[in-house]
Amino acid sequence: MHRRTFIHSSVAAAAAAVLGACSNHRADIAADRSAALRGFVAERMARGKLVGASAALVENGRLAWAEGFGLADRNAGAAMSPATVVGIGSVTKTFTSLAIMQLQRRGLLDIDVPITRYVPQLRIGTRGADLQQVTVRSLMNHTSGLPTDVFKYTELEKARYTDVVDLLNDTELAAWPQTIGLYSNIGYSLLGVAIRNVSGEDYPDYLRRHVLAPLNMSHSGFAGDAALSPLSVLYYADGRTAPAFELRDQPAGGVYSNVEDLSRYAIAMMDAWHGKSNAVIDADSVRLMFTPSNENILVESNRKGLGWFTFRNSTAFAMYHAGSTGFANAALLLFPQTRDAAVILVNTVGGDRLANEYAFDKLKSHGLKVEDIRPVPRLPALDKQATPVVMSAEMLKQCAGAYARKRDFALVSRDGNDLLLVDGDETLRLKSLSDGSFQPFATAATTTQSDLDGVRYRFADAGPYHVLFRIDADGVWQQGYRQPDSATAVAWRERIGRYELFGYQIQGNERIVAAEINAFDTHQPRLQLVYNTGKFAYPLIFGSATHAVTGGLGPQTTGEVVRFSDDGSQLFYSGLTFRKV
């Protein structure tokens, strides 16, 4: 879903009931280590009030440990086991990328050509960008600029992945291609369409034939497959049974599997990286998938290969993907150098925390840390010996403006030879330095200068965006991009009000129920989406009296079209329709 966040609530069942049933598959690792792993998972399941989970470890290229915890079906009293099947959500994207690499290996596809070569029906609005820059590779590493999702007909019973072309043709790019890192589920459905068009096989059929069967993943597949047994029931965070909900975007999140099959998959990928090609992947292709592919992207928050995220330092690396169906959660972490892997599946809303913690706990023992997923900064290096300089009035003027980000604006104004940065409740004075950066100084008693030691700000262009960055000991963080001048903001004040959703409603754990246009401080109107789980606000970048896009840059959902009917009675957002109250 859109937010990818969940509200945690208590479960009536006691921790003893949740953790009462365990199924041990094998224990090739030392008894004290398996006990520690068991305790790690069990403790976090009790803390999160989770109904069931299964986990596995691969060591030196073989399954060393796999175990089930809690229940796969509370009503039937069925225990969770390593064979229990659960939806793996976005871990599916690694399989879709593998299928793309297979087709490239066969000479049927080239990842560095525009996606329109394989999906010629795509005619998405571009806002002046070059659609030819939306390549297969850019879809694989989430730099295509496609929207994160289109919310119309998200469930499989309403539409299939092949319908996303028409849905995309009714909207616009959310970001300039190959400029911003912006995670896109619907982009992976577009890759599924390319696989279908190139191979002549429906995406699920292609994956069953060319990936799952050769790897003997006999308990993996798609909704409705006979192989999906035993299949776990899914649960809300409060312990209620979740309804059946299958995603339209099968190439982005439609695969089901268990930890045994996912371990086979991990072993095959790591073996190929070591030069042992197999029926599904060759060494050259997997090495390309595991190589960082987004290092030239200025506005980015994660290192990505092709279909995978990567933790990386000077001596070690790991490949990672997590997934959520809205109810089930999964994580898969590979250490190709040592041929180790960690796999976990959870059947309860809120299980994403356990899934991530279980995987990330393995990083330290392999010489890595969570922060190693951060990309190498692309900005000019800071000069620690930089001295104050007077910047020209024209350059200061170019920096001034409202910098849109996902939730609000950072406001920059000129004050003599300096800039003033208003960021929420904090106001900083920015003084220019000889290396082109700005040093911040506190202007209020609530912020001391010692809090700002080692902090710099810098302005830089990324494609058409003039971006404000904050640089500190933890990394480089984009603070928004300057909003272009617009004379239409006043017209949007006439749009202020509440608009109720009518017609199609999103299914699943999170649902949008209304949209509001209201005032953002004294600056300008904004969009506020009202979910059943809370409200989420977005600044608006205005294109006309009836057309705007949500402000901010990736990696979060931004750049989505907000459009009004000519009479102002209806609001359209991401395929949904709202009617003014």
Image (tube, rainbow, N blue to C red):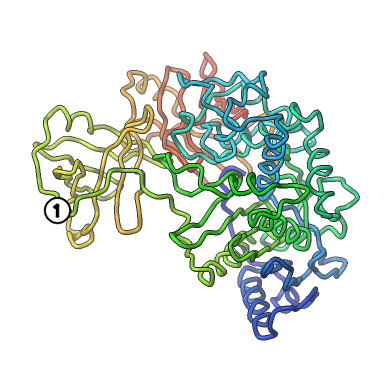
Q: Residues within 10 Å of mark 1 (few under 14, many from 20)?
A: few
Q: Which residue is mark 1?
A: 385
As drawn, which residue projects farthest toward the top?
566
The answer to which of 435 and 122 lies nearer the viewer is 435
Determine whether, in the image, residue 553 is placed left or right of residue 16: left
Is residue 532 in view from this perspective?
A: no
Residue 543, x across and y down, in percent: 42, 20
Q: Amino acid at mark 1?
A: Gln
Secondary element type, mark 1: loop
Q: Look at the picture and state if 90 lies above or below 37.
A: above
Quarter holding residue 195: top right
Question: Nearest the camera: 277 or 374?
Answer: 277
In the picture as drawn, the residue positioned furthest to the bottom comes out as 32
- Name the image quarter holding the C terminus: top right
Q: Is residue 247 visible?
A: yes
- Specify whether 496 is left or right of 83: left
Q: What residue is at 16 percent from the left and 35 percent from the top?
A: 414
